Each structure stands twice: as C-alpha cells, then as structure tokens.
Image (tube, rainbow, N blue to C red):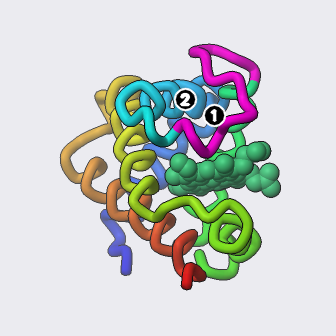
Amino acid sequence: HFNAKERECIATLWGKASGHVEALGAEALNRLFKSCPSTKTYFSKMNLEAGSADLKQQGTKILNAIGLASHHLDDMDNALSDLSDLHAFHLRVDPGNFDLLCHNILVVLAIHFPGEFTPAAHAAFDKFLASVSVTLCSKYR
Ligand code: ZNH
C-alpha cells in the first residue's frame, strides 16, 4: 500500500488543497469538461459553464470525498462504501472516466501548489487518486 514517504506527500498536498476545495474542484471539473467533452454527458442537468454554481458545488463534493479518502488510506473501501454504491449502481459512470478526472485534479494541484508538487508528491498523489478510483469502481459488474 502506501509507504511513509507517500503518506507524507499525500498529507502535505491535501493540507494545501483542503482550504480551497470549491475553487480547485470547480477548476478540475472545468478542465475535465473542456479537455474531455464526452464526460459532460453525465451532468446533463447541470450548468457546466466555467465558474457556475453547479460546477462549484459538484467540485466541492468530489474534493471533499477525496479529502475523506486521504484520511482513510488503509480503509478506503469502508470510508467510500456509499459513494461506490452510488457510482456503480446508480450513476454507472464508465470507469475510464475516472482516469480523466484524476488527471485533471493532478493538473490543478500542480498549477496551484508547484512548491509541494514535487515528482515524489506527484507520484504519491497519482497512486492515491488511482486507488480512490479503483475503490469507486469496485462494485461494477
Ligand atoms: Zn462522482 C456525484 C465523488 C468521479 C459523475 N461524485 C458525486 C458525489 C461525490 C462524488 C461525493 C456526490 C454524492 C452525493 O451527493 O451524495 N466522483 C467522486 C469522486 C470521484 C468521482 C471522489 C473520483 C475521484 N463522478 C466521477 C466521474 C464522473 C462522476 C469520473 C463522470 C465523468 N458523480 C458523477 C455524477 C454525480 C456524481 C453524474 C451526480 C451529480 C448530481 O448531483 O446529479
């Protein structure tokens, strides 16, 4: 799983991001929708313009879930259980979309926290987001 250095990197980066979930989350979603337009189909009822209230609200929810996961590196299945039910049984988001979102989250962190986004932190956070994605996709059949 995660070694001590990885845990330190994840905690440091999340420590920087946690106070800005709305802005960072909205920016990550805006970048996702601009760079991968097919992902917009899941959010047909939302206003997906840059800076919209919907984008801020959804971005906040996603990043708060990632924050929760960062505090449960060793029991993510439990901590994200309801959320994986939602994505697998109700939303049925194609698993490939998770990589796209994770990539855009990394881009946003790299832009806003260049000092903390060292190669080691990049690798650790990438691994962390991948394991959040695996968890959220674990109940797909
Ligand atoms: Zn998701 C929802 C998280 C991915 C799509 N999400 C959601 C929520 C959360 C989340 C928290 C809310 C819930 C409630 O409300 O209860 N996601 C998440 C995370 C991730 C995700 C953490 C990763 C990392 N999602 C995703 C993707 C997609 C999605 C990739 C596609 C593309 N989600 C979604 C939808 C929804 C959600 C559609 C619903 C919205 C509404 O509200 O309508």
Would you say residue 51 sits in the magenta stretch?
Answer: yes
Would you say residue 74 sits in the magenta stretch?
Answer: no
Q: Are marks 2 and 1 in contact (CB under 8 Å)?
A: yes
Q: With respect to residue 27, does 79 lie above or below?
A: below
**Does the image show residue 61?**
yes
Query: Disc 2 to disc 1, how far (Cα)?
Result: 5 Å
Q: Which residues are magenta?
A: 40-53
**Tag on residue 21?**
1
Query: On the rendered image, what quadrant is the N terminus found in?
Result: bottom left
Q: Position of residue 74 (x, y in %)?
A: 54, 80
* Residue at horizontal 63 percent and vertical 14 percent from the top: 51
Residue tagged 2: 24
Q: With respect to residue 70, does 73 lie above or below?
A: below
Quick one: 33 or 80, which is closer to the camera? 33
* Residue at horizontal 55 percent and vertical 85 percent from the top: 141
Assign a secondary structure to mark 1.
Answer: helix
* Residue at horizontal 34 percent and vertical 63 percent from the top: 127
Assign a secondary structure to mark 2.
Answer: helix
Give, as a three-letter code, the residue at label 2. Leu
Q: Position of residue 12 (x, y in %)?
A: 45, 47
Magenta span dominant secondary structure: loop
39 sits left or right of 78 in the view: left
* Residue at horizontal 64 percent and vertical 36 percent from the top: 59
Give, as a three-letter code, the residue at label 1. Val
Q: Position of residue 138 (x, y in %)?
A: 53, 80
